[in-house]
Image (cartoon, rainbow, N blue to C red):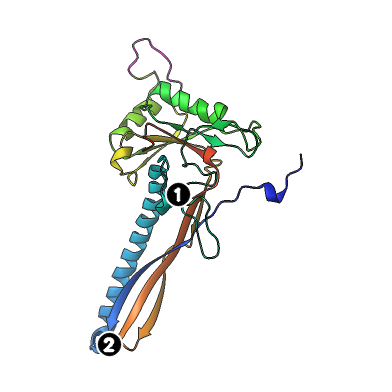
Protein backbone atom coordinates (compact mmCIF):
# COMPACT_ATOMS: atom_id res chain seq x y z
CA UNK A 1 0.00 0.00 0.00
CA UNK A 2 1.03 3.57 -0.63
CA UNK A 3 2.20 5.63 2.32
CA UNK A 4 0.34 8.83 3.07
CA UNK A 5 1.61 11.78 5.06
CA UNK A 6 -1.49 11.79 7.27
CA UNK A 7 -0.68 8.26 8.42
CA UNK A 8 2.63 9.26 9.97
CA UNK A 9 3.18 9.32 13.72
CA UNK A 10 3.08 12.76 15.32
CA UNK A 11 5.50 13.42 18.15
CA UNK A 12 6.01 16.71 19.98
CA UNK A 13 9.38 18.18 20.90
CA UNK A 14 9.64 21.19 23.19
CA UNK A 15 12.82 23.24 22.96
CA UNK A 16 13.83 24.65 26.34
CA UNK A 17 15.78 27.84 26.89
CA UNK A 18 18.62 27.51 29.38
CA UNK A 19 20.47 30.55 30.65
CA UNK A 20 23.09 31.96 33.00
CA UNK A 21 23.44 35.64 33.93
CA UNK A 22 26.13 37.85 35.45
CA UNK A 23 25.24 41.37 36.61
CA UNK A 24 27.96 44.03 36.53
CA UNK A 25 27.12 47.17 38.50
CA UNK A 26 27.86 50.63 37.16
CA UNK A 27 30.24 51.08 40.10
CA UNK A 28 32.31 48.12 38.91
CA UNK A 29 32.49 49.61 35.44
CA UNK A 30 33.84 52.90 36.81
CA UNK A 31 36.78 51.34 38.66
CA UNK A 32 40.27 52.00 37.33
CA UNK A 33 41.01 48.30 36.82
CA UNK A 34 37.54 47.52 35.44
CA UNK A 35 38.68 46.12 32.10
CA UNK A 36 40.96 43.45 33.57
CA UNK A 37 38.62 42.44 36.38
CA UNK A 38 35.54 42.24 34.17
CA UNK A 39 37.40 40.34 31.46
CA UNK A 40 38.45 37.74 34.04
CA UNK A 41 34.92 37.54 35.46
CA UNK A 42 33.37 36.99 32.05
CA UNK A 43 35.98 34.37 31.13
CA UNK A 44 35.35 32.48 34.38
CA UNK A 45 31.57 32.59 34.00
CA UNK A 46 31.79 31.56 30.35
CA UNK A 47 33.65 28.40 31.36
CA UNK A 48 31.08 27.70 34.08
CA UNK A 49 28.17 28.34 31.72
CA UNK A 50 29.52 25.92 29.14
CA UNK A 51 30.20 23.21 31.72
CA UNK A 52 26.77 23.65 33.32
CA UNK A 53 24.97 23.54 29.98
CA UNK A 54 26.64 20.25 29.08
CA UNK A 55 25.72 18.69 32.44
CA UNK A 56 22.11 19.93 32.40
CA UNK A 57 21.53 18.55 28.90
CA UNK A 58 23.20 15.26 29.77
CA UNK A 59 21.16 14.90 32.97
CA UNK A 60 17.95 15.58 31.06
CA UNK A 61 18.58 12.76 28.58
CA UNK A 62 19.67 10.42 31.38
CA UNK A 63 16.46 11.13 33.28
CA UNK A 64 14.46 10.27 30.17
CA UNK A 65 16.09 6.84 30.27
CA UNK A 66 15.50 6.51 34.02
CA UNK A 67 11.92 7.85 34.14
CA UNK A 68 10.99 6.16 30.88
CA UNK A 69 9.95 2.94 32.64
CA UNK A 70 7.34 4.54 34.90
CA UNK A 71 3.76 3.41 34.32
CA UNK A 72 2.61 6.76 35.74
CA UNK A 73 4.76 8.62 33.22
CA UNK A 74 6.69 11.84 33.82
CA UNK A 75 5.71 15.20 32.36
CA UNK A 76 8.98 16.88 33.31
CA UNK A 77 10.87 14.91 30.69
CA UNK A 78 8.27 13.79 28.14
CA UNK A 79 5.85 16.71 27.78
CA UNK A 80 6.48 18.10 24.30
CA UNK A 81 3.93 20.92 24.57
CA UNK A 82 5.00 24.25 23.06
CA UNK A 83 3.10 27.47 22.21
CA UNK A 84 -0.04 26.76 20.15
CA UNK A 85 0.61 23.00 20.20
CA UNK A 86 -0.44 20.73 23.07
CA UNK A 87 1.13 17.32 23.47
CA UNK A 88 -1.77 14.83 23.78
CA UNK A 89 0.46 12.47 25.80
CA UNK A 90 2.34 14.85 28.10
CA UNK A 91 3.68 12.14 30.43
CA UNK A 92 4.48 9.55 27.80
CA UNK A 93 5.90 9.09 24.31
CA UNK A 94 3.95 9.43 21.06
CA UNK A 95 1.97 6.17 21.45
CA UNK A 96 0.62 7.06 24.88
CA UNK A 97 2.87 4.56 26.68
CA UNK A 98 6.03 4.92 28.76
CA UNK A 99 9.17 4.85 26.64
CA UNK A 100 10.02 1.41 28.03
CA UNK A 101 6.87 -0.67 28.26
CA UNK A 102 5.49 -4.15 27.65
CA UNK A 103 2.39 -3.07 25.69
CA UNK A 104 3.43 -0.84 22.79
CA UNK A 105 0.70 -0.96 20.16
CA UNK A 106 0.99 -0.48 16.41
CA UNK A 107 -0.83 1.78 13.97
CA UNK A 108 -2.72 -1.26 12.67
CA UNK A 109 -4.02 -4.32 14.47
CA UNK A 110 -4.36 -5.10 18.16
CA UNK A 111 -0.98 -6.74 18.77
CA UNK A 112 1.33 -5.28 21.40
CA UNK A 113 5.10 -5.44 21.72
CA UNK A 114 7.66 -4.91 24.46
CA UNK A 115 10.97 -3.14 24.99
CA UNK A 116 11.05 -3.57 28.78
CA UNK A 117 11.96 -6.51 30.99
CA UNK A 118 11.24 -5.62 34.61
CA UNK A 119 13.42 -8.26 36.27
CA UNK A 120 16.58 -9.43 34.49
CA UNK A 121 19.99 -9.01 36.09
CA UNK A 122 22.86 -8.36 33.69
CA UNK A 123 24.29 -11.74 32.66
CA UNK A 124 24.88 -13.63 29.43
CA UNK A 125 21.53 -15.42 29.37
CA UNK A 126 19.51 -12.28 30.03
CA UNK A 127 21.56 -10.25 27.57
CA UNK A 128 20.86 -12.85 24.87
CA UNK A 129 17.15 -12.77 25.74
CA UNK A 130 17.01 -8.96 25.58
CA UNK A 131 18.80 -9.02 22.23
CA UNK A 132 16.22 -11.48 20.90
CA UNK A 133 13.41 -9.27 22.22
CA UNK A 134 14.71 -6.34 20.18
CA UNK A 135 15.97 -8.10 17.06
CA UNK A 136 13.21 -10.70 16.64
CA UNK A 137 10.15 -10.48 18.89
CA UNK A 138 9.56 -6.72 18.65
CA UNK A 139 11.30 -6.11 15.32
CA UNK A 140 8.21 -4.97 13.45
CA UNK A 141 7.11 -1.64 11.99
CA UNK A 142 3.79 0.14 12.55
CA UNK A 143 2.09 -2.22 10.08
CA UNK A 144 3.43 -5.27 11.90
CA UNK A 145 5.89 -6.07 9.11
CA UNK A 146 9.39 -7.34 9.86
CA UNK A 147 12.24 -4.84 10.17
CA UNK A 148 15.95 -5.04 10.94
CA UNK A 149 16.66 -3.92 14.50
CA UNK A 150 20.00 -5.25 15.74
CA UNK A 151 21.20 -3.83 19.08
CA UNK A 152 24.89 -3.00 19.24
CA UNK A 153 25.21 -0.77 22.32
CA UNK A 154 25.07 -1.69 26.01
CA UNK A 155 24.41 1.24 28.35
CA UNK A 156 24.98 0.95 32.11
CA UNK A 157 25.44 3.29 35.08
CA UNK A 158 28.99 4.02 36.20
CA UNK A 159 29.85 1.79 39.15
CA UNK A 160 29.61 -1.90 39.99
CA UNK A 161 27.45 -2.77 36.99
CA UNK A 162 30.01 -1.29 34.61
CA UNK A 163 32.61 -3.77 35.89
CA UNK A 164 30.12 -6.61 35.48
CA UNK A 165 29.48 -5.49 31.91
CA UNK A 166 33.20 -5.32 31.13
CA UNK A 167 33.73 -8.90 32.30
CA UNK A 168 30.71 -10.03 30.30
CA UNK A 169 31.79 -8.39 27.05
CA UNK A 170 35.53 -9.02 27.24
CA UNK A 171 35.76 -12.60 28.50
CA UNK A 172 36.40 -15.36 25.97
CA UNK A 173 34.44 -18.01 27.88
CA UNK A 174 31.08 -17.70 29.59
CA UNK A 175 31.62 -15.98 32.97
CA UNK A 176 31.07 -18.14 36.06
CA UNK A 177 30.65 -21.31 34.00
CA UNK A 178 32.60 -24.51 34.75
CA UNK A 179 31.64 -26.16 31.46
CA UNK A 180 34.04 -24.30 29.16
CA UNK A 181 31.06 -22.67 27.39
CA UNK A 182 31.65 -20.06 24.70
CA UNK A 183 30.77 -16.49 25.64
CA UNK A 184 28.38 -15.63 22.81
CA UNK A 185 28.25 -11.91 23.65
CA UNK A 186 31.99 -11.28 23.75
CA UNK A 187 32.70 -8.11 21.73
CA UNK A 188 29.12 -7.99 20.45
CA UNK A 189 28.21 -4.63 21.97
CA UNK A 190 29.86 -1.28 22.48
CA UNK A 191 29.85 -0.58 26.22
CA UNK A 192 28.88 2.88 27.46
CA UNK A 193 29.03 3.58 31.18
CA UNK A 194 27.25 6.80 32.05
CA UNK A 195 27.66 8.64 35.35
CA UNK A 196 24.47 10.63 34.67
CA UNK A 197 22.44 7.47 35.31
CA UNK A 198 22.53 8.24 39.02
CA UNK A 199 19.01 7.36 40.15
CA UNK A 200 19.24 4.79 42.96
CA UNK A 201 16.54 2.75 41.22
CA UNK A 202 18.80 2.48 38.16
CA UNK A 203 21.89 1.11 39.92
CA UNK A 204 21.36 -2.40 38.55
CA UNK A 205 19.46 -1.44 35.38
CA UNK A 206 20.83 -1.70 31.86
CA UNK A 207 19.81 -0.72 28.36
CA UNK A 208 20.39 -2.14 24.88
CA UNK A 209 20.39 0.23 21.93
CA UNK A 210 20.60 0.17 18.14
CA UNK A 211 23.04 2.90 17.07
CA UNK A 212 21.63 2.88 13.53
CA UNK A 213 18.30 4.06 14.92
CA UNK A 214 18.34 5.13 18.56
CA UNK A 215 14.83 6.54 18.09
CA UNK A 216 15.72 9.71 19.98
CA UNK A 217 15.55 13.19 18.44
CA UNK A 218 17.68 15.88 20.10
CA UNK A 219 17.66 19.61 19.32
CA UNK A 220 20.72 21.42 20.64
CA UNK A 221 21.84 24.94 19.75
CA UNK A 222 25.33 24.10 20.99
CA UNK A 223 27.54 26.05 23.38
CA UNK A 224 25.82 28.98 25.15
CA UNK A 225 25.81 32.22 23.17
CA UNK A 226 26.83 35.35 25.02
CA UNK A 227 24.93 38.64 24.94
CA UNK A 228 24.59 41.83 27.01
CA UNK A 229 21.88 44.30 27.95
CA UNK A 230 21.73 47.41 30.14
CA UNK A 231 19.22 47.88 32.95
CA UNK A 232 19.23 51.63 33.64
CA UNK A 233 16.78 51.29 36.52
CA UNK A 234 18.97 48.83 38.44
CA UNK A 235 22.16 50.40 37.14
CA UNK A 236 23.68 47.15 35.96
CA UNK A 237 25.01 45.70 32.75
CA UNK A 238 23.87 42.09 32.48
CA UNK A 239 25.87 39.50 30.61
CA UNK A 240 23.79 36.50 29.55
CA UNK A 241 24.70 33.06 28.28
CA UNK A 242 21.82 31.28 26.52
CA UNK A 243 21.45 27.87 24.91
CA UNK A 244 18.40 25.97 23.65
CA UNK A 245 17.79 22.28 24.02
CA UNK A 246 15.08 19.67 23.66
CA UNK A 247 14.67 15.91 23.22
CA UNK A 248 11.91 13.48 22.40
CA UNK A 249 11.46 9.79 21.61
CA UNK A 250 10.57 9.16 17.96
CA UNK A 251 10.71 5.35 17.93
CA UNK A 252 10.51 3.11 21.00
CA UNK A 253 12.24 0.26 19.15
CA UNK A 254 15.66 1.93 19.27
CA UNK A 255 16.25 1.10 22.94
CA UNK A 256 15.16 -1.53 25.43
CA UNK A 257 15.53 -1.57 29.20
CA UNK A 258 16.02 -4.40 31.67
CA UNK A 259 16.00 -4.85 35.43
CA UNK A 260 14.11 -1.69 36.35
CA UNK A 261 10.69 -1.43 37.99
CA UNK A 262 7.73 0.22 36.30
CA UNK A 263 6.80 2.16 39.44
Q: Is residue 90 magenta?
A: no
User: Which quarter of the rendering shows the C terminus?
Assistant: top left
Percent x, y of residue 258: 41, 32
**Number of the label disc, if any, that sits on residue 26:** 2
| Residue drawn 36% across the image and 30% down it | 165
In front: 197, or 143?
143
Q: Look at the numbered disc 1 and give the secondary structure of its residue.
A: loop
Q: Which residue is mark 1?
A: 91
User: Which secondary structure is most common in the magenta stretch?
Assistant: loop
**Relative to 168, is 68 above or below?**
below
User: Going by the image, does 98 lie left or right of 52?
Assistant: right
Percent x, y of residue 94: 54, 47
**Relative to 238, is 254 above or below?**
above
Q: Is residue 179 magenta?
A: yes
Quadrant position of residue 206: top left
Percent x, y of residue 138: 56, 30
**Can I make out residue 3 in this image?**
yes
In front: 246, or 90?
90
Q: Which residues fall within the magenta stretch?
A: 176-185
**Relative to 113, is 196 above or below?**
below
Looking at the image, is mark 1 or mark 2 nearer the viewer? Answer: 1
| Residue drawn 68% across the image and 47% down it | 7
User: Which quarter of the rendering shows the N terminus?
Assistant: top right
Percent x, y of residue 71: 42, 40
Quadrant position of residue 195: top left
Q: Earlier in the sequence, mark 1 or mark 2?
A: 2
Q: Look at the numbered disc 2 and give the secondary structure of its residue.
A: helix
**Can I make out residue 185 in this image?**
no
- Pick out the residue farthest to the top: 179
Dot 1, how many residues are within 10 Å of its Cα: few (below 14), some (14-19), or many (20+)?
many
Give the CA separation, mark 1 to mark 2.
46 Å
Amino acid sequence: PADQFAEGITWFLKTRKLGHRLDLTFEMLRQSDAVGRITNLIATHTTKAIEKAVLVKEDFIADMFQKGTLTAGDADFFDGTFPNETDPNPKFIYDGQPWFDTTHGLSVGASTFSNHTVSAALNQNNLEAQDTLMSVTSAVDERGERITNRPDTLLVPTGALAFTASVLLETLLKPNSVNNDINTVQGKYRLIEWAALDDAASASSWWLGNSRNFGLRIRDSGAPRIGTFIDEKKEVVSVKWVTRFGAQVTDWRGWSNANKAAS
